[in-house]
Amino acid sequence: MGHPVDFKGANSILNGPDGSENIEVMRVFRNGVSCTSCWALSPDELAEIAQTGRIFITVLAGQSQPPVFAGGEEETRSLVADYGVWRK
């Protein structure tokens, strides 16, 4: 399973609910319109993605999925720049 990692531009921390044991602290960039996190994948996960070209996104709450975006750093910066400044 991927793990959230710190990244240049992160300006806030999200924590799981009190007592949660399977939720890691997550550094994010947020500006009131968007919230971006960065994830590191294991070599096995990277190999599977390289082989299939697919990723899965799961929201662990509710019965639907809010608008989400998955992409590399430069593409994400381009999207987020429309909503505020994420400095390099």
Image (tube, rainbow, N blue to C red):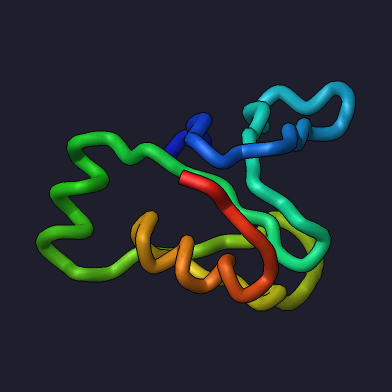
- Going by the image, does 77 lie left or right of 44? right
Which residue is outermost to the right?
Answer: 18
In the rendered image, which quarter is residue 53 located in? bottom left
The residue depicted at 21 percent of the width and 58 percent of the height is 49
Residue 77: percent from left, percent from top: 47, 61
The residue depicted at 20 percent of the width and 40 percent of the height is 44
Q: Is residue 18 depicted above or below 34 in this figure? A: above
- Quadrant that contains the N terminus: top left
Which of these two is toward me, 36 or 11?
11
Q: Is residue 71 depicted above or below 48 in this figure? A: below
Which of these two is toward me, 39 or 20?
39
Residue 29: percent from left, percent from top: 65, 47
Q: How many marks?
A: 0
Residue 27: percent from left, percent from top: 63, 34
The residue depicted at 67 percent of the width and 28 percent of the height is 25
- Going by the image, does 40 lie left or right of 26? left
Residue 75: percent from left, percent from top: 38, 68
The residue depicted at 71 percent of the width and 23 percent of the height is 21
Which of these two is toward me, 88 or 59?
88
